Amino acid sequence: MRQSIKLTNRFGMSQMEAIERGKVNRLRLKQLVKNISLVKEGDRYPHLYFFSPPGLGKTYTVLNYLKDSKIRYIQVSGNVSMFAFGIQLAVINYLNPERENIVIFVDDCDEILKNEPNCNTMKNVLDGSKVFTYEKSLTSQFNNLSAIQQAAITHFQEEGKMGFSVPTDNLIFVFTSNFKLPVDDEVQLAREKGLAKSVLLSHRNAIRSRCRVADFDIGWAEQWGWIADVVLNTSCLAPYQLTSMETQIILDFLWYNWEFLTERSIRLVEKMANTMKEYPENFKLLWEIDYLKN
């Protein structure tokens, strides 16, 4: 079985330095989330896009703020087809005849930004015409929809045209994602090298230009520090009633085995705490079996 690496200073910094950076990054996320607001006259960039490695609690932080702020919001999935995404928007605005402003929280947007046509659709949703447009025949899909979905689609259909169009000018989109939208230099480099992906990168870069983007593009030490700050300064492990020593054992295991872990997340810490309580005699062995790469 692999042994823990016994180093006091890893990834170019100490544990205390990593925790401090994690604390700063978590605070920055909380501050940026407070920028979520409803449509304001003259605000050209109301939409927000949060990127970070997975497992750090982006979704939890956004949802917590939205619930506490009393802002009217609806959470939708972005990991669905554009047809399914459009139906979600159609139902939302069909049930909102007064066109009140609503925050649309999109958790995981891999699919809706998967290719060039999807990105083009989303560009029009966020800016310009501010309309979601689906221009394909609905014949084969219509009978599979629920009654409310059928009513919403019918409401947003235009006579003589296929598909449907949903106005989105009353919607503010907040995205959380595990992939980073490309910056200008990445697009330029791809073009210079003649890479096939340069066109898709350009479209995704156009999504970046239409949002206020918060990139938490952090290294391993800062990821560990972020998780450690959550563990030490929130009640996430309260149900397990760990001692300070037990908590430190968990954090040390992550620190010394970080590059060998099968997952790196707050959820992993909770699972480790559960194992520690259920198997106090051999929890470390079980951690190695369950959470380290073979």
Image: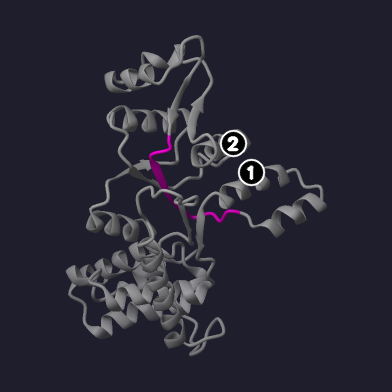
- Residue at screen point 25% across, 57% down: 69
Q: Determine which quarter of the picture holds residue 265.
A: bottom left
Q: Measure how far apart labels 2 and 1 are at the Cα level.
A: 7 Å
- Residue at screen point 57% across, 85% down: 12
Residue 220 lies, in percent from the top left, at: 51, 73
User: Counting other residues with Cα less than 10 Å from the Cα at mark 1, is it few (<14), some (14-19), or many (20 or more)?
Assistant: many
Residue span colored magenta: 168-181
Residue 270 lies, in percent from the top left, at: 29, 66
Residue 63 lies, in percent from the top left, at: 30, 55
Q: Is residue 176 magenta?
A: yes
* Mark toward the start of the polypeptide (2 vs 1): 2
Choose between 66 and 191: the one closer to the eye: 66
Residue 1 lies, in percent from the top left, at: 46, 73
6 versus 67 height, above or below: below
Q: Mark 1 falls on what kind of element?
A: helix
Q: Is residue 119 magenta?
A: no
**Residue 91 as seen in the image, left or right of residue 158:** left
Choose between 285 and 27: the one closer to the eye: 27
- Residue at screen point 48% across, 75% down: 222
Q: Determine which quarter of the picture holds residue 140.
A: top left
Q: What is the number of the mark on residue 120?
A: 2
Q: What is the number of the mark on residue 117?
A: none
Choose between 291 and 204: the one closer to the eye: 204
Q: What is the number of the mark on residue 203?
A: 1
User: Counting other residues with Cα less than 10 Å from the Cα at mark 2, is it few (<14), some (14-19), or many (20 or more)?
Assistant: some
Looking at this rendering, what residue extends furthest in the bottom direction? Answer: 8
Tell me whether the residue at label 2 lies in contact with that at label 1, contact meaning CB atoms closer than 8 angstroms: yes
Whether residue 133 appears in this view of the structure is yes
Q: What amino acid type should be assigned to the residue bearing mark 2? A: Asn
- Residue at screen point 46% across, 71% down: 223
